[in-house]
Amino acid sequence: MNATTPRLFIAATEQNAGKTTTSLGLYAALRKDFQRISFIKPVGQRFVEVEGKQIDEDSVLIRDTFGTEVPIEDMSPIAVEPQFTRRYINHANNDTLVRRIQHSFDRTAWEKDFAIIEGTGHAGVGSVFDLSNARVASLLKSKVLLITPAGIGRPIDEAALNKALFDKENVEVIGVIMNKVLEDRMESIADIARRGFERLGLELLGMIPRERMLSQPTLDQICHNIRGKFFQGAGKGRKRIDKAIIGAVSSHNILRGIEPDSLLIIPGDREDAIHAVVARSREADGGPFCGMVLSDDIQPRKELADSIRQSGLPVITSSLDIYLIASRIHSMTVKTLPGDTEKIDRIQSLVRTHVNIPRILEKIR
């Protein structure tokens, strides 16, 4: 297996801590030092179908953003679909999986100047089929950069737990990046967090501030998450929402105190309230709502439907009730998608500004 290409394994202390954000930003930043960079996510849990193959969505994001010139199936050699673990426990085939990962790494890293390897979940994820993040990092002979959430006690506790598993596999963790830190608390956290990590033998290599835009879902993402469909405004599906509000008040109060870029979730039979929102959206400033979700699969009657279409307000219908819709939106994981250039540009700027890239390269070398 390739042992010469410089490489870095991006791990995290928990799911959705910011591995993809960091990988995306590092890929862009490292292009100043390395002309040809490869990417691989050896074990993926969230996948899409590409050319008849199950491919991790983060690999698709990197490919489409940077135009990586390697087969997409090698950027995502193992996709953990629903029956994967059950089949493995019944018929363990670890040697086959190991060879697949190593072969794919060789292909992605061929004639490259640097390789980024993205893990999945915390260090122990994948242990059930003998391919934890720690073991995969060991198999690929890579040092590790650990991503933690913001704070002091919890991130340090979780870093200690994760580092213990990497230590067991003789994998070096070069340091930590703390993600989603409130900007007004960065200075107060930095010194004490740095000293806390140093007690574990870890260096704090960056603190990325929380960016509201990165956690805002788009209408397209919400539509998919609530199993809905656009009644109107599908062309505005990339519009981000700032807040989701349940419209459980009278039509006289439905517009009171609403902040800009709010999404209204309302029962499909509340025609009086829907009329009020649509009328407000037809005014010159467009109103505060960036969209509306109608619950219970109730379709607007013709007169109301015509008014909605004239307003241009994006409207999604869903068969779910309003409380289930609100719960799904509140708990959804907001991922960066290919083509979301504003968000991708912001991620690259945050990593370039707040992560110590030269020190990371020094510790790898």
Image: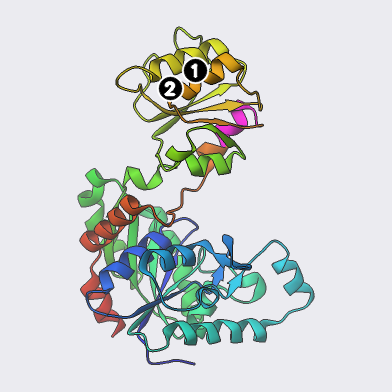
Q: Residue at x 70, y 68 (%)?
A: 84
Residue 180 seen in render: no
Q: How is the image coloured?
A: rainbow
User: Disc 1 and disc 2: Cα gap in Å?
Assistant: 6 Å
Q: What kind of residue is marked 1? A: Ser
| Residue 78 position by quadrant | bottom right
Question: Most prominent secondary structure in the magenta stretch?
Answer: helix
Which residue is identified by label 2?
Answer: 311
SS assignment at label 2: helix
Q: Residue at x 34, y 51 (%)?
A: 343
Q: Is residue 60 left or right of residue 356?
A: right
Question: Residue 56: percent from the left, percent from the top?
Answer: 54, 65
SS assignment at label 1: helix
Indicate the quadrant containing the C terminus: top left, top right, bottom left or bottom right.
Answer: bottom left
| Residue 109 position by quadrant | bottom left
Q: Residue at x 25, y 64 (%)?
A: 355
Q: Residues within 10 Å of mark 1 (few under 14, many from 20)?
A: some
Segment colored magenta: 320-327
Name, please, the residue furthest toward the top: 252
Q: Is residue 93 left or right of residue 160?
A: right
Question: Residue 232: percent from the left, percent from the top?
Answer: 51, 31
Which residue is identified by label 1?
Answer: 307
Please tell me whether residue 203 is drawn above or below residue 274 in the rendered image: below
Residue 164 seen in render: yes
Please tell me whether residue 66 is drawn above or below residue 169 in the rendered image: above
Q: Residue at x 25, y 46 (%)?
A: 183
Q: Is residue 355 left or right of residue 118?
A: left
Q: Are marks 1 and 2 in contact (CB under 8 Å)?
A: yes
- Residue nearer the viewer, 9 or 82: 82
Q: Exactly how many numbered labels are in the figure?
A: 2
Q: What kind of residue is marked 2? A: Ser
Question: Residue 107: percent from the left, percent from the top?
Answer: 48, 85
